[in-house]
Image (cartoon, rainbow, N blue to C red):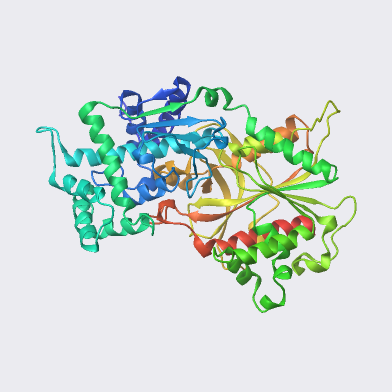
């Protein structure tokens, strides 16, 4: 009788990811759940089994501080104080008197309804919901850890450190000595060293709220203790309007139609269109920065100019480039649809070829066939399919016949996790695998590794995984993909969704040419296989400037030359 082989960590982790997503969809359809109740237990258990790299020591008794910093940058300020979290669609709150709260690292509108309730607006599809629920599950696990350390169930009393933390939080302003005493008690509560707690305190603190970290830990513990003692359960709900609208591309359709109207209004609809998913600065700066900034910056290299423009304090220089670009035919379309995806249109027939970056030559075509560069800001997960799928559909305005766009290429530049290499290195994919499904998208990439030779950055070619959420990065699953015959070089969240939209439009719906060109290139924001190099370890900073502009230059060279 053959021995049954035990499951590997990669198989267990894959099963945990599938369980999490099935559970999230079930809870969404149900309409509400209690995260620390029976309904939320599956999510908690799956996350603890998965142990994502971003959440570090989530499965240990001690608190995970880097993960806490990461998720609170992506959730609305004050959410740790709220017993009720309501996920809603765009339901008119922007016209109310409620203050809009936008998390520092995620573009989503949130509203504090009262002391106990936070409403989070979902306009970017299912990926947004998965992202929020995963972060909230981590938050509730951490809050329960605090409760377990400070609340003595046998006697029903609190440890001394909790009383001291409560006393510190109740004070309006702490002296340096009082702050150090409070942080000492906090280190006991969190199971972390004083040094680690002090570092986190500095990360969360600001001039207006120097002791925000103390308050966050206090409120996380307070709500968990109240739930333990009095049974006042925290609840997450999904509004009926959100459940009704999700998956119907409502925001994507408004976004796409607004852009098509702008193209028609400016006589650009029939021109060759080149879609570029990037950001709102790299294409504009690559084309115009040197000429816009003039002789004062003539001695600086292109890279030095781009680094200068990327620094937060140089807003006036950026405004100068924007004004110059608008004189050269750039049209800015700010988003009002709820997608949070702004757009820039560059009419190359209006560009004075003597006033752009000389690397693009002086002889690109300038007539009725001049290309239109359509630059869209980054989409988020499944939102990439919603927006591009709607944009590639034929346009029908006021009963007129269908009009088809002349889309010649789709270029995608983005950040991704790399499985071999360092932050800033490049990945050029030839296929996308959609994690958790049987969907594979092979394609011919107009870009290749040779295009980027001689730039000191390492370049990898192979397959990319489109993951269900970056917060579920798991070392065992990624190592399996990296070591297997799939030849996986990295992971990101949008590639398969973009390619699904392009392939359905070109090969099935025939709304764009079947031979439409595609370009994909990513630069590494993190290496989830290396401890200390995950997304929770911090952003790229100035390291990301060089790969961003190398990719942008190559895309533009192929389009214009």
Q: Nearer the viewer, residue 116 or 15?
A: 116
Q: Quadrant of residue 40?
A: top left
Measuring 28% from the left and 52% from the top, which residue is drawn there? 172
Instruction: Confirm whether residue 519 shows in the render.
Output: no
Q: Residue furthest top?
A: 30
Q: Quadrant of residue 425?
A: bottom right
Q: Position of residue 282 (x, y in %)?
A: 65, 58
Side of 144 where 130 appears, left or right: right
Q: Position of residue 560 (x, y in %)?
A: 79, 58
Q: Residue furthest right?
A: 367
Vertical position of residue 154 compared to residue 491: above or below = above
Side of 507 where 86 appears, left or right: left
Q: Quadrant of residue 494?
A: top right
Q: Nearer the viewer, residue 431 or 139?
A: 139
Measuring 46% from the left and 47% from the top, which residue is drawn there? 483
Q: Quadrant of the C terminus?
A: bottom right
Instruction: Confirm whether residue 122 shows in the render.
Output: yes
Vertical position of residue 283 compared to residue 138: above or below = below
Side of 83 where 502 appears, left or right: right
Q: Residue furthest left?
A: 155
Measuring 48% from the left and 50% from the top, which residue is drawn there? 104
Number of numbered callouts drawn: 0
Q: Quadrant of the N terminus?
A: top left
Q: Position of residue 88 (x, y in %)?
A: 51, 30
Q: Position of residue 97 (x, y in %)?
A: 52, 37
């Amino acid at each position: 009788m053959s021995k049954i082989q035990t499951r590997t960590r990669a198989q267990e982790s894959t099963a945990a990811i599938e369980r999490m997503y099935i559970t999230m969809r079930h809870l969404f359809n149900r309409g509400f759940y209690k995260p620390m109740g029976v309904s939320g237990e599956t999510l908690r258990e799956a996350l603890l089994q998965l142990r994502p790299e971003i959440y570090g020591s989530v499965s240990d008794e001690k608190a995970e501080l880097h993960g806490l910093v990461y998720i609170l940058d992506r959730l609305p300020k004050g959410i740790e104080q709220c017993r009720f979290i309501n996920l809603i669609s765009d339901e008119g709150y922007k016209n109310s008197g409620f203050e809009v709260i936008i998390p520092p690292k995620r573009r989503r509108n949130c509203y504090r309804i009262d002391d106990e309730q936070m409403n989070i607006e979902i306009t970017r599809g299912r990926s947004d919901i998965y992202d929020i629920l995963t972060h909230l599950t981590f938050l509730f696990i951490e809050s329960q850890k605090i409760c377990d350390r400070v609340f003595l169930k046998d006697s029903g009393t609190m440890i001394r450190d909790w009383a001291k933390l409560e006393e510190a939080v109740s004070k309006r302003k702490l002296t340096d000595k009082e702050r150090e005493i409070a942080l000492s008690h906090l280190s006991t509560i969190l199971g972390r060293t004083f040094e680690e707690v002090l570092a986190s305190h500095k990360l969360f603190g600001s001039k207006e709220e120097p002791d925000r970290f103390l308050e966050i830990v206090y409120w996380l513990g307070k709500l968990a203790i109240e739930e333990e003692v009095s049974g006042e359960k925290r609840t997450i709900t999904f509004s009926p309007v959100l459940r009704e609208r999700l998956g119907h591309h409502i925001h994507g359709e408004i976004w796409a139609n607004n852009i098509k109207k702008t193209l028609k209004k400016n006589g650009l609809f029939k021109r060759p269109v080149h879609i570029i998913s990037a950001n709102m600065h790299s294409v504009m700066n690559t084309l115009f920065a040197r000429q816009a900034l003039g002789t004062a910056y003539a001695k600086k290299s292109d890279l030095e100019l781009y680094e200068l423009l990327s620094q937060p304090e140089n807003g006036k220089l950026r405004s100068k480039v924007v004004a110059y670009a608008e004189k050269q035919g750039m049209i800015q379309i700010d988003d009002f649809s709820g997608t949070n995806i702004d757009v820039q249109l560059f009419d190359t027939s209006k560009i004075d070829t003597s006033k752009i970056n000389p690397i693009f030559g002086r002889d690109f075509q300038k007539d009725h066939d001049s290309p239109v560069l359509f630059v869209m800001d980054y989409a988020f997960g499944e939102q990439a399919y919603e927006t591009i799928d709607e944009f590639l559909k034929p346009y029908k305005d006021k009963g007129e016949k269908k009009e088809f766009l002349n889309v010649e290429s789709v270029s995608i530049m983005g950040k991704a996790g790399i499985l071999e290499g360092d932050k800033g290195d490049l990945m050029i994919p030839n296929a996308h695998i959609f994690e958790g499904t049987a969907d594979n998208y092979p394609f011919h990439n107009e870009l290749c590794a040779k295009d980027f030779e001689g730039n000191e950055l390492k370049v990898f070619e192979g397959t990319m995984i489109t993951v269900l959420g970056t917060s579920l990065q798991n070392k065992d699953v990624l190592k399996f993909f990296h070591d297997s015959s799939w030849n996986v070089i990295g992971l990101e969240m949008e590639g398969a969704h973009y390619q699904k939209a392009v392939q359905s439009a070109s090969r099935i719906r025939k709304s764009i040419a079947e031979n439409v060109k595609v370009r994909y290139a990513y630069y590494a924001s993190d290496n989830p296989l290396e401890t200390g190099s995950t997304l929770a370890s911090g952003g790229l900073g100035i390291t990301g400037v060089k790969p961003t502009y190398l990719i942008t230059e190559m895309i533009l060279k192929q389009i214009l030359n």
